Amino acid sequence: QFALLGIQFNWTLQCQTALEKCKTSKGIMSETNKQQTSILTELSSWCLQDLGSKMNRTKIETLVTIHVHQKDVFSDMTKLYKERKIQDANDFEWLKQARFYWRPNVEDRHGPGASIISVCDTDFKYAWEYLGCKERLVITPL
């Protein structure tokens, strides 16, 4: 659960930062894409190791599946950026994605700080819903 949330926080932060800086930092989109490939390479290398249990293997495979989708989404956005079809973090291609943010100034029932999931112009407070540890074959786009 925490690993899934963590990988989604990390992906959102990397993408958001790249999209905010892409007007002033020419290579940041490609650089971010390479960073995400590196993360995926590391995660997938874990699948080749003895992970001790079927449950651990399913957890790692789930992280890989999620990150493959995330990497594909950002690769597509990088391509659109190079074609000048997106310009910043306010573009619909980014806003339509499920984005995971940590907001230290927002409170939830556990106190200060909250995980916020944003899709388009809607924000949801993450309420620690249990996602389970199940196999995922693919993630489909919006």
Image: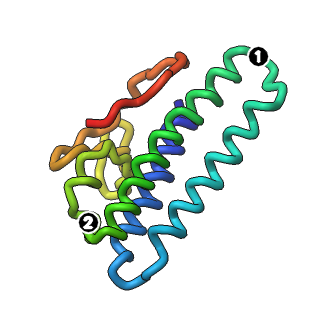
Front-most of 141 and 7?
141
In the rendered image, residue 39, in percent from the top left (x then y), is placed at: 63, 51
In the rendered image, residue 29, in percent from the top left (x then y), is placed at: 45, 68
Q: Which amino acid type is shown beneath numbered disc 2?
A: Ile
In the rendered image, residue 92, in percent from the top left (x then y), is placed at: 20, 55
CA–CA distance in space, label 1 to label 2:
43 Å
Q: Which mark is residue 132?
A: none
Q: Quadrant of the C terminus?
A: top left
Residue at 71% over, 14% down: 54
In the rendered image, residue 18, in percent from the top left (x then y), is placed at: 42, 68
Front-most of 31 and 5?
31
Instruction: Say whether residue 74 is visible.
Output: yes
Within-10-Å neighbours for mark 1: few <14, some 14–19, many 20+: few
Give the residue at mark 2.
Answer: 86
Within-10-Å neighbours for mark 2: few <14, some 14–19, many 20+: some
Give the residue at mark 1.
Answer: 53
> Image quadrant of residue 109?
top left
| Helix, strand or loop at mark 2 | loop
Front-most of 116 and 31?
31
In the picture, measured across the screen, residue 76 lies left or right of residue 61, that is left
Q: Which amino acid type is shown beneath numbered disc 1?
A: Ser
- Whether label 1 touches label 2, CB < 8 Å: no
| Helix, strand or loop at mark 1 | loop
- Residue 65 to residue 103: above or below: above
Residue at 52% over, 60% down: 33
Of all residues, the one furthest to the bottom in this rendering is: 24
Mark 1 or 2: in front is: 2
- Residue 91 to residue 48: above or below: below
Instruction: Say whether residue 109 is visible.
Output: no
- Residue 72 to residue 22: above or below: above
In the picture, measured across the screen, residue 96 lies left or right of residue 110, that is left
